Amino acid sequence: MASKEEKLQSRAVVPGTFDPITVGHIEVIKRVLKVFDEVIVGVAESPRKGNGPMFSLDRRIELASEALKDYKNVKVIPFTGLLVDFVKECNARVIVKGLRAVTDFEAEFQMSALNYRLDPDLEILFIMSTPENMYLSSSVVKEIAYHKGNVYGLVPEPVGRALCEFTGCEYTEE
Ligand code: PNS
């Protein structure tokens, strides 16, 4: 039987702003599920990110939950304070983040160093994006949507519909 310690190790938190969730995020979450028994998707309020998120925290939670509804070992939970506190509240010790390109590295390196400083018991792991999703981010999706381009294939369908409502962009299979 697994010890309490082992059980804690089998839960990972995948944090982010998810404004909105993309197929790249889903790919990362699916791969984290191959390694951990349970994944908690922590959706940060992130009020100060850029000009503020496009979607409210409630709407981001709704869209992420809808996109991940088929994965029974995934829970989508909002958080407003520090990530390290949220991870503790989740009774977890491992954070996993996707890493797309060298450009992500600097910010992630700084954030993980600070998170380790705030809580040395944490482990922060990175998973490399697949080549197909290396270029994909919520920001590029929003940029395409704002310019009324087609976001098909970049985001799950409910997110595509939400983006179309918001920006008048397209979500059409080519
Ligand atoms: O998807 P993002 O925007 O790159 O995710 C960044 C996120 C939400 C993981 C990060 O900003 C975060 O952890 N926010 C919560 C506040 C916090 O703990 N900041 C880091 C202290 S160094």
Image: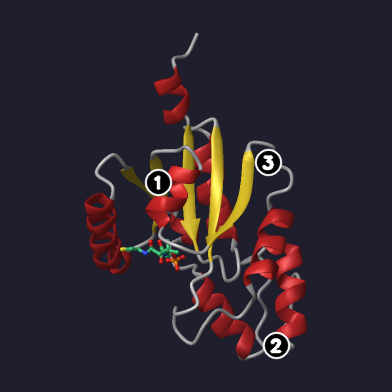
Q: Is residue 126 left or right of residue 170?
A: left
The quarter of the rendering in which ligand 1 is drawn is bottom left
Q: CA distance from mark 3 to mark 1?
A: 19 Å
Q: Which residue is mark 3?
A: 71
Residue density around tag 3, few if under 14, some if 14–19, many if 20 or more, within 10 Å: some
Q: x and y percent of residue 53 in the render?
A: 55, 79
Give the secondary structure at mark 2.
Answer: helix
Q: Earlier in the sequence, mark 1 or mark 2?
A: 1
Instruction: Tell me if residue 98 can be seen.
Output: no
Q: Which residue is mark 2?
A: 167
Residue density around tag 2, few if under 14, some if 14–19, many if 20 or more, within 10 Å: some
Q: Give, as a three-letter code, the residue at label 1.
A: Ile
Q: Give, as a three-letter code, the residue at label 2.
A: Thr
Q: Camera-side residue: 70 or 93?
A: 93
Q: Earlier in the sequence, mark 3 or mark 2?
A: 3
Q: CA distance from mark 1 to mark 2?
A: 33 Å
Q: Is residue 90 left or right of residue 167?
A: left
Q: x and y percent of residue 131 in the render?
A: 44, 56
Q: Which residue is mark 1?
A: 95
Instruction: Tell me if residue 91 can be seen.
Output: yes
Of tags 3 and 1, which is closer to the observer? Answer: 1
For the C terminus, the quadrant is bottom right
Q: Give, as a three-letter code, the residue at label 3.
A: Tyr
Give the secondary structure at mark 3.
Answer: loop
Q: Residue at x 51, y 64 (%)?
A: 80
Q: Residue at x 32, y 65 (%)?
A: 104
